[in-house]
């Protein structure tokens, strides 16, 4: 491991001050925000001080020290995803992070996403503080998935070089999947001794199927007008094309045409109206419910309606943390066959070839007619989440990495 700069010697047992840099509108109810939230909560429970520097938008979470940038004077409605406005947002974030670093005097800088690692890398060298990069996937790969970057365009090589530069800055990487670690080694020539796998985890206490009674679930079903004789396929996450939402709509159309009594409960945002319109065009508006944004605190209740869950993400460059919540809720999971889904689900997933909507539809249909298999897979997945994906053990791993860099 590259020798980490240390401002002063500290005892292994003393609490640490951690400056987290989150170049996003934290907190929002999706993806990487949940990882930041759970890491912070469990680090605080272990006695450490965490300060999160983030954009001006987002929900304040009780008990968290969140420091926000000032809003841009010309763009106050920023949403998720790649945008040219992020450059200005990140300049503001860098200034705010420097101010907070001087105030907090952290022992560790913990950067999320590539912009967080870039800002953290600059602070690390200015202030002689070790940098940990919470690596979720490739920056250029994500920009391509969001259709913000053309892989054959003139800008792509420059973006790739920037990503290479950023990957030289951290003293340690926490990777959300084994595949992400291999990507760092193979694509960006990161030394293996700087890479520490830290898969996304599930809160198995909050996401527990026995928390909700049949009466609770029936009340929620009636709230959204879902017929009682239909099995429910649940999805919770961002609503974008690269997450496979159009594939869900096409699968719903095929299953309705086949006479299946099934209903798709699609929870998340943005682009809700766009996909509602597409469902109407495909004639499945009566077989799909789009709830819009579901608060993280309410996610277990909404997911409890599912007889099975689905992960149709077609991106091969990002994690898929929603699958762990499905597992914790003891729900069988139909998923596209990707390395990340295999890592989480192992041989307990019901797989379809990535991008093959016909195969995805067939996998759902087979599971609809096999209640015994649904029950068995759900129970085994709940057990796997409990044993292999606990935030308690993951947090201890983070602390050990911190200690290696600071002791």
Image (cartoon, rainbow, N blue to C red):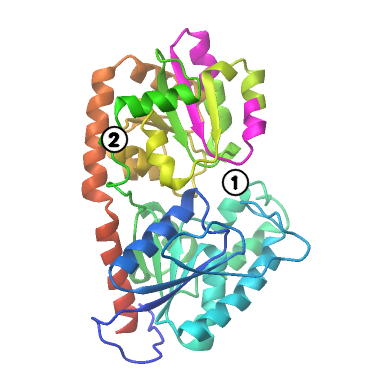
Q: Which residue is mark 1?
A: 145
> Disc number at residue 406?
none
**Residue 198 place in picture, x, y as percent:** 34, 59
Quarter in which the C terminus is drawn: bottom left
**Residue 339 place in picture, x, y as percent:** 39, 44
Picture layout, residue 81 above or below residue 50: above
Mark 1: give few (<14), some (14-19) or many (20+) Cα within 10 Å.
Answer: many
Q: Nearer the viewer, residue 326 or 76?
A: 76
Give the residue drawn at x 39%, y 22%.
363
Give the tally of numbered discs: 2
Name, please, the residue furthest toward the top: 259
User: Does the segment drawn in magenta span residue 119?
Assistant: no
Q: Which residue is mark 2?
A: 209
Q: Quadrant of residue 306?
A: top left
Give the residue drawn at x 76%, y 66%.
73
Residue 31 in view of the camera: yes
**Residue 65 place in picture, x, y as percent:** 46, 69
Give the residue drawn at x 41%, y 72%.
50
**The residue stretch that appears in magenta:** 251-276
Q: Does dot 2 land on a helix, a strand or a loop?
A: helix
Picture layout, residue 266 above or below residue 321: above
Q: Nearer the viewer, mark 1 or mark 2?
A: 2
Q: Nearer the viewer, residue 283 or 291?
A: 291
């Amino acid at each position: 491991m590259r020798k980490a700069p240390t401002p002063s010697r500290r005892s292994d047992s003393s609490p640490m001050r951690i400056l987290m840099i989150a170049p996003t509108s934290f907190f929002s109810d999706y993806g990487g925000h949940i990882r930041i939230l759970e890491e912070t909560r469990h680090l605080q429970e272990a006695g450490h001080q965490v300060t999160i520097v983030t954009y001006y938008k987002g929900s304040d979470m009780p008990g968290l020290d969140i420091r926000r940038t000032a809003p841009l004077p010309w763009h106050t409605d920023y949403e998720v995803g790649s945008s040219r406005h992020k450059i200005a947002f990140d300049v503001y974030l860098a200034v705010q992070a420097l101010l907070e670093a001087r105030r907090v005097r952290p022992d560790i800088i913990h950067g999320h996403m590539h912009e967080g690692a870039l800002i953290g890398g600059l602070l690390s060298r200015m202030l002689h503080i070790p940098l940990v990069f919470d690596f979720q996937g490739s920056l250029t790969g994500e920009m391509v998935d969001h259709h913000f970057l053309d892989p054959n365009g003139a800008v792509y090589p420059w973006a790739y070089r920037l990503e290479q530069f950023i990957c030289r800055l951290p003293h340690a990487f926490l990777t959300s999947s084994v595949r992400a670690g291999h990507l760092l080694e193979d694509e960006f020539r990161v030394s293996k001794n700087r890479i520490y796998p830290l898969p996304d985890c599930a809160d198995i206490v909050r996401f527990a199927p026995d928390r909700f009674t049949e009466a609770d679930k029936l009340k929620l079903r009636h709230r959204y007008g879902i017929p009682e004789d239909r099995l429910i396929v649940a999805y919770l996450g961002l609503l974008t094309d690269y997450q496979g939402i159009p594939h869900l709509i096409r699968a719903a159309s095929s299953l309705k045409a086949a006479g299946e009594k099934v209903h798709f409960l699609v929870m998340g945002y943005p682009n809700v109206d766009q996909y509602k319109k597409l469902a109407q065009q495909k004639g499945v508006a009566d077989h799909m419910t789009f709830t819009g944004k579901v608060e993280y605190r309410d996610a277990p209740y909404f997911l409890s309606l599912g007889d099975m869950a689905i992960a149709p993400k077609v991106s091969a460059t990002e994690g898929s943390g929603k699958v762990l919540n499905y597992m914790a809720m003891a729900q069988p999971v139909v998923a596209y066959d990707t390395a990340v889904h295999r890592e989480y689900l192992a041989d307990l997933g019901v797989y379809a070839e990535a991008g093959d909507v016909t195969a995805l539809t067939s996998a759902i249909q087979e599971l609809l007619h096999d209640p015994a298999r649904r029950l068995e897979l759900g129970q085994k997945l709940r057990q796997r989440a409990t044993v292999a994906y606990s935030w308690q053990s993951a947090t201890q791993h983070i602390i050990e990495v911190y200690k290696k860099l600071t002791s």
